[in-house]
Image (cartoon, rainbow, N blue to C red):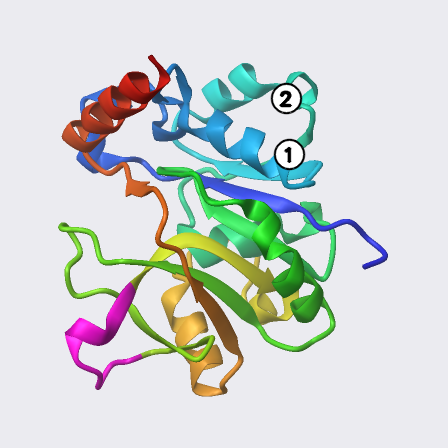
Amino acid sequence: MSVAPSAMILAAGRGERMRPLTDHTPKPLLHVGGKPLIVWHIERLRAAGFRHVVINHAHLGEQIEAALGDGAALGVAIDYSREASALETAGGIATALPLIRGEAFAVVNGDIYTDYDFGRLAEPLTWLAAGGDQAHLVMVDNPPQHPNGDFVLEDGRVKSGEQAAESSRLTFSGIGVYRRALFADLRAGEKAPLAPLLRQAMDAARVSGEHYSGRWTDVGTPARLAALDEELRRHAA
């Protein structure tokens, strides 16, 4: 690729289920294992070769900028996409597109923890940039709080699976690669969910995927945050 791709971290959510912790701290800055969730992402993205990171924010976003600055201390260059109020996933990505480099780019939810190797996204980034697909999704086993899953993964292709048995579905991890064209019909600054765009692309057989069975946690409640923190500190001891 002539332009090194960007990675985007989604950090605009209010984190209602994490209250009262998120009343004064944005969820991506909550600490686990001795550092903020978002710093774990940035360090792993950098290790995988990403040097440019775009972060969108809304709720208490100034704290994210104050904590991370321009990214130099973490070995990356950070640009911020500021939202007056959260625009949902697709709306946030569409609004940030002017800051994103490359025809295809990686995206990760700021409120998950994972040891996924982002270097595995190099091949789908190249494939999508060449126009092969619209999206590539990293799928994980269904967690207890989401037992019915999201989509079906068959032979490296992701299908909506609306008619499939719940037992055959996996959960979308919040890690993906997208082609800019997926968001072509969205206007910057407008709210828009991601799922309808993905389902349209799936219906056109233009979504690839992979199954990741390593560590992944949706840090959605104070209890899950505390359990993850204890686990990481125990393993580091």
Please report whichever mark, 1 or 2, sits nearer to the chain's N-terminal start. Answer: 1
One can see residue 167 in this view: yes
Q: Secondary structure at mark 2?
A: helix
Q: Secondary structure at mark 1?
A: helix
Which disc, if any, is residue 74?
A: 2
Q: The magenta stretch spans which residues?
A: 161-170
Q: Quadrant of residue 131?
A: bottom right
Q: Quadrant of residue 211?
A: bottom left
Q: Is residue 113 above or below residue 176?
A: above
Q: Nearer the viewer, residue 31 or 48?
A: 48
Q: Is residue 64 above or below residue 179?
A: above
Quadrant location, the N terminus: bottom right
Q: Nearer the viewer, residue 125 or 191?
A: 125
Q: Amino acid at mark 1?
A: Arg
Q: Residues within 10 Å of mark 2 (few under 14, many from 20)?
A: some
Residue 32 x, y percent position in the rendering? 33, 22
Q: For this view, does 51 lie left or right of residue 179?
A: right
Q: Amino acid at mark 2?
A: Leu
Q: Nearer the viewer, residue 191 or 18?
A: 18
Residue 79 x, y percent position in the rendering? 66, 34
Residue named by callout 1: 46
